[in-house]
Amino acid sequence: MMKHLEKTDKHIYDLIVKEEVRQTNKIRLIPSENYASAAVLEATASVLTNKYSEGYARKRYYEGQEFVDEIEELAIQRAKDLFGADHANVQAYSGSPANLAIYFAFCQPGDTIMGMSLPHGGHLTHGWKVSITGKYFNAVQYTVEKETGLINYDRVREMALAEKPRVIFAGATAYPRILDFEKFGEIAGEAGAVFVADIAHISGLIAAGAHPSPVPHADVVMTTTHKSLRGPRGALIMCKEAHKKAIDRAVFPGLQGGPHNHTTAAIAVALKEASTPEFKAYGQQIVKNAGALAEELVRYGFDLITGGTDNHLILIDMTNKGFPGKVVSRALNRAGIVCNSNTVPYDPRKPFDPSGIRLGTPAVTSRGMEEDAMKKIAAWMDFVVKNTEDEAALDRTAAEVAKFCKDFPPPGLGREKT
């Protein structure tokens, strides 16, 4: 499939092949990563990248849109059908630009916005101070409880009523529990705020019925289309009919020009795949795998934030094991198990050298791994932590992991690996 690339730019070709081998021979536990299907990859690599399409379907500024329009309309309808939304915008380039468009639709510079604190599991774009969202707006941040690691909805309500934010974001990148979207909707309504649900991590779970949906309760719902949804690197903004014009105008012409048509097509493919019974089984298995992995890690003495998980994600404080998160994540990577270091709530360490690690099961579930595989992964993780500084032991584990991975070929990757 890459014969022309190999001839034109052997250096890039070789690096892509090496990355493909890495994705095949390692156990990938970064919760925001996954494997797109071959069909999604083909759409992403299609001739649609040659076309410019400023505007919306049937209302473009350039000619030659007859096929692009139909593709975008298909993507929109499939998003609406899958999630039960009134309206969907499929043009946002990714999650952060999509969230910025939502602010642009409803806020003026200096308005108060409210979101989950980044060190407590939120996202940069929910108003954290190093993000443009924390600089252009008056951002107030809710946290989790120190004793439990859980959101206290009474405190969220108190903050919302006191601060009167224009927008309230609910959503997380490192929160391993079910989000109560109904409660957030009630709080936003009481405070007179626009309620935005950021489901970038859990949209695949929602599509599969493995997590409650925010659509009945939120004014706007944003999701990336990779992660648990297994699509390309893009985003969807869904909203109630009353907000359709504001959202569409914020995306274009507010923040960007022409959409990436190849990505739009790949989103449409991913949404079709996500509407199947097989995908629903997949989403349910993600949660089963995360629960099984969490249970085994607790048995090995790992300190899980909130004590476990009920979604796709596990957050671990490594302090009781005697190593910071970055040391552990690097040792695991050498041993063939890929995760990321991560802050934990009330972390005494700095963000670039935090106490924790973050794991997720979407990618391994895409490979067909189930609960028994999670037990093996937990055992390897325990061994690696006990042998963090033994490079020979880590290399032996990497060989074992690579051999194990051969029984679970990743979707979308066609080459044979050695």
Image: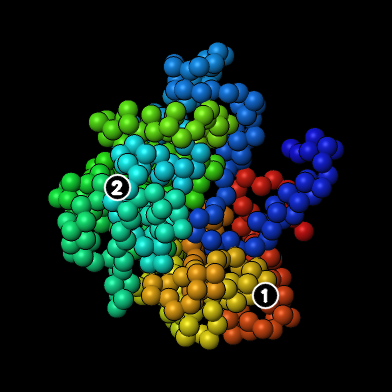
The residue closer to the viewer here, 221 or 205, is 221
- Image vertical order of residue 343 relative to residue 369, above or below: below
Residue at which label 1 appears? 397
N-terminal of the pair, mark 2 or mark 1, is: 2
411 to the left or right of 254 = right
Residue 51: x and y in percent read 60, 23
Residue at (65, 34) in percent of width and height:
45
Query: Percent from the top left, x then y, of residue 174?
Result: 42, 63
Residue type highlighted by circle 2:
Asp
Can residue 301 be seen by looking at this rendering? yes
Judging from the image, what secondary structure is the residue with disc 2 in? loop
- The image shows residue 174, relative to residue 69, as above or below, that is below
Where 170 falls versus 387 (above or below)? above
Residue that appears at 55% across and 32% down:
260
Lateral position of residue 162 relative to residue 255, left or right: left
| Image coordinates for residue 106, horizontal then vertical, percent | 30, 39
Residue extending furthest left?
190
The 10 Å Cα crowd at callout 1, few under 14, some 14 to 19, many 20 or more, is: many
Crowding at mark 2 (Cα within 10 Å: few <14, some 14-19, many 20+):
some
* Corner quadrant of residue 98: top left
Asked whether 342 or 142 is in front, the reply is 142
Q: Nearer the viewer, mark 2 or mark 1?
A: 2
Up/down of 364 relative to 219, above or below: below
The quadrant of the rendering that contains the C terminus is bottom right
Q: Residue at x 57, y 43 (%)?
A: 37
Q: Are marks 2 and 1 in contact (CB under 8 Å)?
A: no
Write down the residue under mark 2.
111
Viewer-proximal residue among 121 and 231: 121
Element on which disc 1 rests: helix
- Camera-nearest residue between 157 and 171: 157
Q: Amino acid at mark 1?
A: Thr
Judged from this view, the residue extending furthest toward the top is: 63
